[in-house]
Image: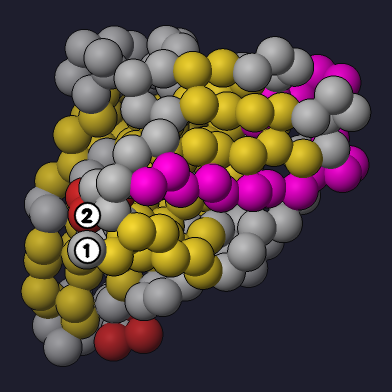
Amino acid sequence: GAVVSQHPSRVICKSGTSVKIECRSLDFQATTMFWYRQFPKQSLMLMATSNEGSKATYEQGVEKDKFLINHASLTLSTLTVTSAHPEDSSFYICSAISGGVEGYTFGSGTRLTVV
Amino acid sequence: DAKTTQPTSMDCAEGRAANLPCNHSTISGNEYVYWYRQIHSQGPQYIIHGLKNNETNEMASLIITEDRKSSTLILPHATLRDTAVYYCIVRALNTGNQFYFGTGTSLTVIP
């Protein structure tokens, strides 16, 4: 089946620095990818829709200047958390429309801890 | 996309069938019912989906009521590895439609 690889799986960064998370579709082309954030004991919250070759569409309340999304190729989308603060610590998950029976395939997630 | 309502949590004895209900009373005619699960600290995993008819695969069965306002995911012989949060999502198949997650059901399989 379709595979979405997310890297890194865990990252710890200092407050004020930026962190980049990569999401790759390994065996299919993904013109659209999605980024989610999940706080402990909560559900996944959609942050933005990433479209290859165009600007991302952000959900209401998500700061586009803080969460920079780049989808420069059909197999790679990146999420950069800029000027990270401890409240940005969360589990970030990407997904892609894989076109298979499952519809969407999810990455394994990135645990971000800002200290 | 139509909203869904699921119980917050459920327990199931190992080896027994786990029946997870989902209400989607405002579902539209072109919306499918999808089930995903999320094991702790992992990305969601696809389980099954359906439109009108009951569906079965190697993981589970999906029973959709005739009026399509509710459905039940059945794990026929639950194992400890089935302990996870199960999400019921309804959406149309149009490319680009976002996937919104509800609160899901936290299933605990008890030895």
A36 to the left or right of B103: left
Give the amino acid at mark 2.
Leu
Task: Give the image location of residue A26, x and y in percent.
Answer: 18, 19
Q: Which residues are magenta?
A: B16-33
- Chain at numbered mark 1: B
Choose between B18 and B68: the one closer to the eye.
B18
Residue A84 in view (yes/no) = yes
Task: Give the image location of residue A28, x and y in percent.
Answer: 29, 11
A13 over B19 or under it: above or below: below
Give the residue at x 62% y 64%.
B7
**Which mark, by number, is residue B20?**
none
Give the residue at x 68% y 48%.
B22
The residue labelled by disc 1 is: B111
Quadrant showing the C terminus of chain A: bottom left
Give the amino acid at mark 1.
Pro
Callouts 1 and 2 close, C-beta under 8 Å: yes
Give the residue at x 36% y 76%.
A40
**Magenta segment includes B61:** no
Residue A64 in view (yes/no) = no
The residue labelled by disc 2 is: B80
